[in-house]
Image (cartoon, helix red, strand yellow):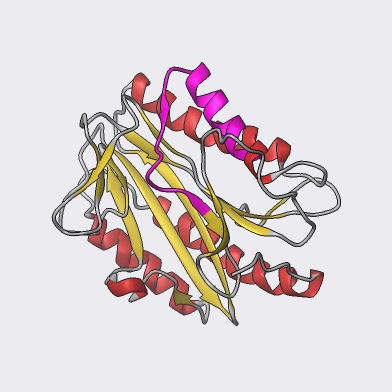
């Protein structure tokens, strides 16, 4: 499958799905508190998405049963919502997708719960900033893996490691489209960036080594060394100028 280039009209339509996704995050974030369960957060997200006439992108995708992924502490990605209560000092990565009128939006944020350590807050901050560092290269004339390389460069400069087992992706009418987007340096620069490319860039950054493993539920990925991990994601579009961050309010 080749990379699907979107017209300005298609991006305008896709932007609607992306804004619903971003506002769903805003709703969920209000309730990320000590004592709340990740299953309660899941319901808040689903209720909001459906109230907007949209459908949760992740629900029933490859058999996944929930609306959000909620990854706590050493969980890297794809954490399944449960009756687990959030504790003071936890960090939780919330990944949300919404499908509206033929297009998907996808974004993730990592949040602290209660009294969070300075070390954990720094990890969250570096993870978020690695995304913003990377999109400085998300412009015409550059290549896809220029984005990838900048993420790893920035993360390593700050003493962390980049997950290699999970990557970003194109997005549009399908939740996962071409191209695949590693978040680490590649031996080549990749395809040239073109106006109308829509990309979900989502660095997953570990406090320790980059190795991960998937638990017996078949979904939840955790750090092998059980140190903390953080996740940050936005859906963007390549334009004539600066990239359009579609899942940012």
The correct choice, above or below, for 79 with respect to 117 in the image is below
Residue 30 seen in render = no
Determine the residue positioned at 35% across, 68% down. Answer: 67
Q: Which is more toward the observer, 86 or 171?
A: 171
Q: Point out the image quarter for the N terminus.
A: bottom right
* Residue drawn where x is 32% and y is 26% of the image: 209
Q: Is residue 83 left or right of residue 207?
A: left
Residue 27 picture quarter = bottom left
- Considering every residue shown, the one lying at the far right of the view is 240
Camera-side residue of 245 and 47: 245
Q: Measured from the top left, where is residue 143 in percent x and y?
A: 72, 43
Q: How many marks?
A: 0
Q: Is residue 34 left or right of residue 232?
A: left
Q: Is residue 224 visible?
A: yes
Residue 52 in the image: state x and y as whole percent.
Answer: 52, 77
Quadrant holding the C terminus: bottom right
Magenta stretch?
A: 147-168
Q: On the picture, is 89 further left or further right than 240?
A: left
Please name whichever residue, 180 or 41, is drawn nearer the observer in this view of the structure.
180
- Is residue 163 on the magenta stretch? yes
* Magenta span includes 190: no
Give the residue drawn at x 78%, y 44%: 139
Residue 154, position as x, y percentages in the image: 56, 24
Q: Position of residue 136 (x, y in %)?
A: 72, 36
């Amino acid at each position: 499958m080749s990379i699907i280039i979107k017209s300005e009209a298609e991006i305008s339509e896709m932007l609607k799905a992306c804004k619903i996704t971003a506002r769903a995050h805003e709703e969920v974030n209000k309730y990320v508190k000590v004592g709340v369960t990740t299953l309660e957060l899941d319901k808040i997200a689903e209720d909001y998405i459906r109230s907007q006439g949209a459908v949760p992108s992740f629900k029933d995708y490859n058999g996944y049963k929930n609306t959000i992924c909620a990854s706590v502490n050493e969980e890297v990605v794809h954490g399944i919502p449960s009756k687990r209560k959030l504790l003071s000092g936890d960090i939780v990565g919330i990944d949300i997708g919404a499908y509206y009128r033929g297009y998907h939006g996808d974004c993730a944020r990592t949040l602290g719960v209660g009294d969070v350590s300075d070390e954990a807050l720094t990890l969250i901050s570096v993870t978020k900033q690695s995304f913003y560092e990377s999109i400085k290269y998300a412009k015409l004339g550059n290549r896809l893996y220029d984005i990838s390389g900048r993420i790893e460069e920035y993360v390593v400069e700050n003493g962390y490691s980049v997950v290699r087992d999970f990557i970003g992706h194109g997005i549009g009418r399908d939740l996962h489209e071409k191209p695949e987007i590693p978040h680490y340096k590649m031996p080549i620069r990749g395809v040239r960036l073109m106006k109308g490319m829509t990309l979900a860039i989502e660095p997953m950054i570990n406090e320790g080594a980059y190795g991960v493993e998937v638990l017996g539920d078949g979904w939840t990925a955790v750090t092998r060394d059980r140190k903390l991990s953080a996740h940050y994601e936005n859906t963007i579009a390549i334009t004539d100028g600066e990239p359009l961050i579609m899942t940012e309010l």
